[in-house]
Image (spheres, rainbow, N blue to C red):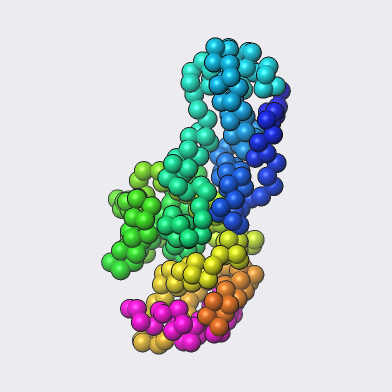
């Protein structure tokens, strides 16, 4: 018997694969839930568990068969919840995210300002592990390390250095200890690619940037460009290679121009940010 939504919570009906508004609770929960694997739609599983809690509160002495009948599902769907007190992994992760203030978030919250910076980090100098959902950041000097540690501290998280970073890493690889996989799922829900997703032909800038206040857009650009910037003999402009689709490069250039009122351009696999744009973002005053 398939999972149904007897109480009409509606999470299973949310048709979205990324969060455009972090304050939209239902969409955030549904998108986050679907980062988990389950034979059914994980968003529907959250619906069912919420409904199960409501029914059980009304019938605390009922067995799994009676509760299943009231919910309109097979007993196997809820037996472990009743007999063993089990809680689905997706619900455990959601509880962690909600307790930490990561779902939902307002654009002006401390949590979202930190998440915005971390999304920029993942897309410019980091990754979300394809299977474990751990977040990883590559830092190449003390200044970069302090920046990522400061962003994580806003979320009351600590950076941990990987003892074995593997091959192909130019710099130090940092991860997050407690709740790192939940953090990875939240960042992915906000539009940060997972695994090799940064090179997919449909990769795009996080959709929330379209409706975010300018301060959020500016902070995202500054973090991103600080990670991409390389020594250029004192030149005020920034030029860097970006092996992403042309559509992604256009989005990036448009965001720079919208925020700064100055020009930027893209050509093949390179992005060029003019000196005027760099100055307007305040990056000319930082080493």
Where residue 237 sits: x, y (%)? Answer: 45, 85
Left or right of 256, for residue 228: left
The image quarter containing residue 30 is top right
- Give the answer, above or below, for where 185 lies relative to 37: below
Where residue 98 sits: x, y (%)? Answer: 48, 42
Where residue 66 sits: x, y (%)? Answer: 64, 13
- Give the answer, above or below, for where 236 lies relative to 37: below
- Give the answer, above or below, for where 272 lies relative to 69: below
The image quarter containing residue 53 is top right
Residue drawn at the location 40% of the way across and 79% of the way down: 283
Residue 119 falls inside the magenta stretch: no
The residue sitting at the left extreme is 142
One can see residue 221 in this view: no
Residue 274 falls inside the magenta stretch: yes
Count of numbered circles on the image: 0
One can see residue 5 in this view: yes
Residue drawn at the location 42% of the way across and 86% of the way down: 236
Quarter of the figure that contains the C terminus: bottom left
Residue drawn at the location 36% of the way across and 43% of the way down: 178
Quarter of the figure that contains the N terminus: top right
The image quarter containing residue 223 is bottom left
Residue segment shown in magenta: 262-287
Where residue 137 sits: x, y (%)? Answer: 40, 58
**Could you say which is closer to the camera, residue 109 or residue 121?**
109
Residue drawn at the location 57% of the way across and 41% of the way down: 33
């Amino acid at each position: 018997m398939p999972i149904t939504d007897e109480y009409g919570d509606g999470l299973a009906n949310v048709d979205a694969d990324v969060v455009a508004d972090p304050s939209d609770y239902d969409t955030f929960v549904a998108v986050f839930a679907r980062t988990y694997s389950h034979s059914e739609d994980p968003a529907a599983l959250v619906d069912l568990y919420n409904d199960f809690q409501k029914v059980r509160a009304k019938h605390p002495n009922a067995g799994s068969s009676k509760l299943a009948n009231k919910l309109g599902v097979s007993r196997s769907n809820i037996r472990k919840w009743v007999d063993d007190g089990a809680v689905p992994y997706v619900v455990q992760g959601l509880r962690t995210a909600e307790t930490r203030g990561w779902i939902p978030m307002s654009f002006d919250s401390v949590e979202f300002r930190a998440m915005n910076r971390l999304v920029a980090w993942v897309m410019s100098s980091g990754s979300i592990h394809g299977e474990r959902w751990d977040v990883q950041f590559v830092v190449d000097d003390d200044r970069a390390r302090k920046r990522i540690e400061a962003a994580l501290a806003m979320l009351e998280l600590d950076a941990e250095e990987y003892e074995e970073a593997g091959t192909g890493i130019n710099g130090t690889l940092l991860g997050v200890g407690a709740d790192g996989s939940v953090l990875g799922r939240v960042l992915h829900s906000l539009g940060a690619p997972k695994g090799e997703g940064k090179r997919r032909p449909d990769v795009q800038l996080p959709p929330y940037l379209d409706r975010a206040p300018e301060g959020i857009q500016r902070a995202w650009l500054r973090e991103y460009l600080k990670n991409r910037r390389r020594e250029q003999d004192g030149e005020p402009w920034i030029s860097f290679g970006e092996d992403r689709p042309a559509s992604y490069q256009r989005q990036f250039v448009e965001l720079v121009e919208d925020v700064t009122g100055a020009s930027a351009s893209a050509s093949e696999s390179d992005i060029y940010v003019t000196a005027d744009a760099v100055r307007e973002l305040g990056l000319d005053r930082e080493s």
